[in-house]
Image (cartoon, rainbow, N blue to C red):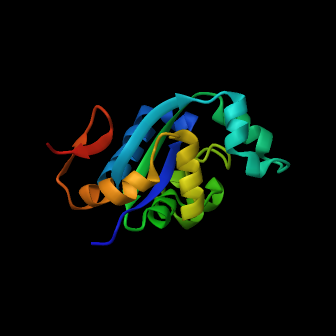
Amino acid sequence: MQKLQLTLAIIKPHAVKNPIALSYIRNVIKNKFVVIKTKRVSLDKETAENFYKEHVGKFFYNRLVTFMASGCIDLHVIGHSNAIELWRRLLGPTKVYKAQFEEPYCLRSLFGISDTRNVAHGSDSPTSAEREIKFFFPDFSFYDWHHNDEVVYRKGPIIFNDFLFQHVRRL
């Protein structure tokens, strides 16, 4: 079995507010990935601006920042041997209209509203995943993960804790 790759999944405010969408997305996550960390936060505008700073100056930047600060978001550090590509494939195309025509059963097609309100975010590379995970989980140690925890989450024994919405070591 290949080592687990980590990525960040962000469930956006409109999906967190929709119990049907949230339940469906959570089921996809827990059935396809090992869930390492989870938390729900409400971003202030400054934190949203800092997270999306690479998009400053783009036409959608202000709309994206305002939207991401409009309600709670769910943050998940998820693992799979091919986590980044798999999560992005499950999300589908960034543009919801395109997703509806090209990938009618992807998450963005099913629950996306617009290109900004496209249900969820997925890191686009291992470098981005590490930077984004550290942004939201500053105490997460990639060193400890790779040297101590990865093999336990890959080989077990682990169980899924529904209350925490994450996998934990079986004692």
Left or right of residue 120, residue 61 in this image: right
Q: Quadrant of residue 128?
A: bottom right
How far from the left and from the top, in percent, is residue 43?
Answer: 62, 30
19 w.r.t. 87: above or below? above
62 w.r.t. 150: above or below? above
28 w.r.t. 46: above or below? below
126 or 45: which is nearer to us?
126
Residue 19 appears in view: yes
66 w.r.t. 123: above or below? above
- Name the residue: 64% across, 36% down: 68
Which residue is most to the bottom?
1
How far from the left and from the top, in percent, is residue 61?
Answer: 78, 44
- Name the residue: 42% across, 67% down: 82
Q: Quadrant of the C terminus?
A: top left
Q: Quadrant of the N terminus?
A: bottom left
163 or 15: which is nearer to us?
163
